Image (cartoon, rainbow, N blue to C red):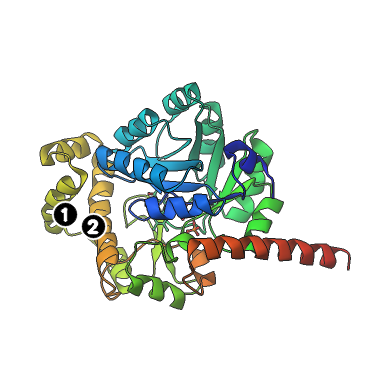
Amino acid sequence: MQTAVTELFGIQHPILNAGMGRVALPEMVAAVCNAGGLGVLGAGSSPPEQTREMIREIRSRTNKPFGANTPLALPNGLENAKVCLEEQIPVINYSMGRGDWICKAAHAYGGKVMASVADQNLALKAQQHGCDAVIAAGYEAAGHSGAVTTFALIPRLAELLDIPVIAAGGISTGASMIAALALGAGGVSMGTRFWTTKEGPMHQGWKEKALELDVSDTLYSAKFDGIPCRQMDVPGARKMMDARMFNVFSVFQHSFQIARELEIPWTRLVIDTMKKGPKEIEGMMRMSQMLKSHSHTLVSGDTSKGFTTVGMSVGMVHDIPTIAELMDRIIAEAQECQANLARNVLG
Ligand SMILES: Cc1cc2nc3c(=O)[nH]c(=O)nc-3n(C[C@H](O)[C@H](O)[C@H](O)COP(=O)(O)O)c2cc1C
């Protein structure tokens, strides 16, 4: 299946895993690449030297093109973008910030850049800033999604932009991939479907929890980290969403652990956060609580505590395959869907 996205990145299938922080790790990235897609590392807020090591590990596991996502507004985000440039990785995916300097530097060594966007204004800016593609996340998506659904957003961006659009949000099967391509996307990026695989680092208990959930079992709120964000509907997430105040004492206590994990001095973490303004400070404090809940899902299968990020597509997740099995299945489903469509259209 050749599309503008397979040509742009030199890959076999127009399928990417979402660059999920602390979840899309080298094992997952290499498995996606080796199965013919574009694996994307979730650098998240990882310490820059850890990001460098992860990039090198991916290179030791695959010789195929790969990418890395770095959310520029988060601690270590800018530093991680610089590491990706120094390591001359094939594809850089930035989110939450302006990336014209990344495009310029990546293009100088032949790299490609894609921005993650959730509306048409951000998408147009990304194109102006020199991006080679955008990943557009509709309302259905896990994490920070926009207010417009994938079904409305993708055709509008396909109409507006000259660069390829990669659809995200609500996609987990070959049929949903074909639907996205029919709407004008050149490829798809999936988060929820990829973390519920054998290679996903979440505790088995959370993967099994995902199998129980339906398309309506997510929560969407700005209370998680200050920006509208979709999370799994479990008691831990409801508790955070329903709380009138977040626990400042717990945030203070947790800030030391965050500074340690990010390998940045505690005072720098506090000063950088303070500089951002009251709304952002509240957002960062909320995010620190959310990250604590997410950390729990990596080490414990107790789903009565903590929560994690999922999109509405979780309702279509019914098993925990390997990534190679999943990729084969999605391609087979896509071919079957195309054949069925042709039959239906012909009556
Ligand atoms: C566990 C998890 C972690 C995520 N972390 C990030 C991240 O670090 N950076 C980012 O730009 N998007 C992140 N996302 C959002 C995805 O990039 C993507 O928009 C979303 O997963 C698409 O919806 P889907 O889950 O229905 O496929 C995350 C998603 C999940 C499920």
Residue 86 versus residue 216: which sits nearer the camera? 86
For numbered disc 2, what is the local secondary structure? Answer: helix
In this view, which residue lies farthest toward the right?
A: 346
Query: Which of the numbered marks, if any, corresponds to residue 343?
Result: none
Horizontal relation, residue 12 to residue 93: left or right: right
Residue 218 in view of the camera: yes
Q: Position of residue 321 (x, y in %)?
A: 49, 69
Residue 24 in view of the camera: no
Horizontal relation, residue 150 to residue 60: left or right: right
- Residue labelled 2 has its Cβ within 8 Å of some atom of ligand 1: no
Tell me the residue at 25%/66% (across/down).
Answer: 299
Lower sequence index among marks 2 and 1: 1
Instruction: Indicate the amino acid at tag 2.
Output: Gln
For numbered disc 1, what is the local secondary structure? Answer: helix
Q: Is residue 265 above or below residue 169?
A: above
Query: Which of the numbered marks, if any, corresponds to residue 289?
Result: 2
Q: Is residue 91 above or below residue 254?
A: above
Horizontal relation, residue 235 to residue 159: left or right: left
Question: Tags 2 and 1 in contact by the CB under 8 Å rule?
Answer: yes
Residue 51 versus residue 179: which sits nearer the camera? 51
Q: CA distance from mark 2 to mark 1?
A: 6 Å
Instruction: Indicate the amino acid at tag 1.
Output: Val
Q: Residues within 10 Å of mark 1 (few under 14, many from 20)?
A: some
Q: Position of residue 252 (x, y in %)?
A: 12, 52
Q: Residues within 10 Å of mark 2 (few under 14, many from 20)?
A: many
Tell me the residue at 27%/75% (across/down).
Answer: 302
Residue located beneath label 1 in the image: 251
Horizontal relation, residue 51 to residue 264: left or right: right
Q: Position of residue 169 (x, y in %)?
A: 53, 56
- Residue labelled 1 has its Cβ within 8 Å of some atom of ligand 1: no
Tell me the residue at 62%/34% (across/down).
Answer: 163
Q: Position of residue 129 (x, y in %)?
A: 51, 27
